[in-house]
Image: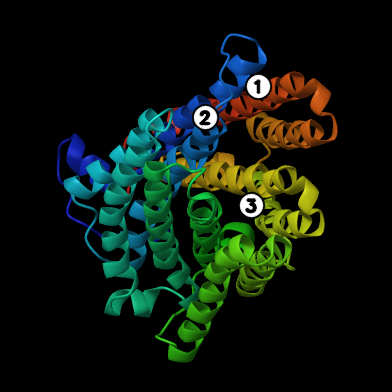
Amino acid sequence: MSELPQRREGGPVAALRRDPWRAFFPLGVLLGWAGVANWLLWALGVSHRYNAVFHATTQVQGSLTAIALGFLLTFVPRRTGTPPPSAGTLAAGLLAPVAVTVLAWDHWAAAQVVWAACVAAVAAFVARRALGARGAERLPPVFVWVPVALVAGIGGAIAVAVAAARGPADEPELWLLGRGLVLQGLVTALVVGVGGTMLPTLTRGEPPGPTPARGRRRLAQVAAALVFLASFPVEVYASPRLGLALRAVSAGAVLVAVARLWRPPTAPGLHRRLIWIAGWLLPAGYAAAAAFPGQRTAALHVTFIGSFALLALSVALHVTLSHGGHPAALAGRPWQVRAMALLLAAATAFRLLLALDPARSRAWLALAAASFVLATLAWSALAAPALGAGPAPE
């Protein structure tokens, strides 16, 4: 990510405003541990509560949200040549994933209200820069999926809060609609918007070209995003299979076409190939869920772990090493990256085995959770020196 020269200011707050990823990425990893700890403790018999809502909420609205916000608050100002986030925006972004994790164990409605309010501040920050004159000049049309993602996440959170306050059993359709928008819509649209913008650079080293305002192309992306959003009420109120298929086609087609995913990575570095694979696995998981609706939850974990988690950790590693003073590691195949990839693949496989062999559910959940934690530890082993380093020279 290119950066315009900025006046250096001292102090930890100023440093964090320049490099928000330094706080958000480690936070995302820690919250990921919290999200799978529930499964691990339950599988080992330490905990007796099977809290699926807490797990899903913490993984997406906690862990993945923290990593996504760290990237957006770093990338958007640098790409658009606009001021960095204020201390208030940073505080709201850091509070959102922590608050939802703390409250999601029992207070579902409160968790969504606090999360939505905090993310709204970040959404306003991104929208002003992405949709303004400089954003139109410097960001491609596909980036409109990012503000759409944040709005969808906030709308879904409000729907979940209302359904939770009334009782999910009394508002099952509203609950499912809100959960779909939050758990799938938010991150998927972020992947399409950011991936369509950055995957050619990250995987093939293609420099970002000039991006003058293209009204028709931007409108086409808005139309595609609306079809994607429509897939959620279609799934809940009409046909689950059709809704999932619409999701696979609308999001997958845009990502594949704009990022030109049929072109394999050419830039050196194993993490780049992982980013490319994660891009393909996003529509693959939705397509599998549409094809096998009886195994919907298991199939969606191909998207959740194989795409979302792999992409988040790989992109976070790229940002951390390139901006943290260790760019040479990006060109190789460090054992930490190989271990992270293999362990996330194992976590996905164990989660699929849970659906095929429910009699051994505790064992498969324990193995899946342990694999995920070990994958993030491998990530941390490579990223930690760069996270603690000073800002990279300009």
Q: Quadrant of the N terminus?
A: bottom left
Q: Secondary structure at mark 1?
A: helix
Q: Residues within 10 Å of mark 2 (few under 14, many from 20)?
A: many
Mark with earlier residue (3, 1): 3
Q: Secondary structure at mark 3?
A: helix
Viewer-nearest of discs 3 and 1: 1
Q: Is residue 88 left or right of residue 303?
A: left
Q: Is residue 312 left or right of residue 239?
A: left
Give the residue drawn at x 52%, y 58%. 185
Marks 2 and 1: CB-CB under 8 Å? no
Mark with earlier residue (2, 3): 2
- Give residue 35's mark: 2
**Where is residue 386, by image quadrant?**
top left
Viewer-nearest of discs 2 and 3: 2
Marks 2 and 3: CB-CB under 8 Å? no
Q: Nearer the viewer, residue 70 or 46?
A: 46
Say above or below: 85 vs 141.
Answer: above
Residue 163 appears at what percent x and percent y? 43, 48
Say above or below: 96 vs 47.
Answer: below
- Give residue 242's mark: none
Residue 297 appears at what percent x and percent y? 70, 44
Asked if one can make out residue 206 in the rendered structure from this viewpoint, the answer is no
Q: Nearer the viewer, residue 64 or 257?
A: 64
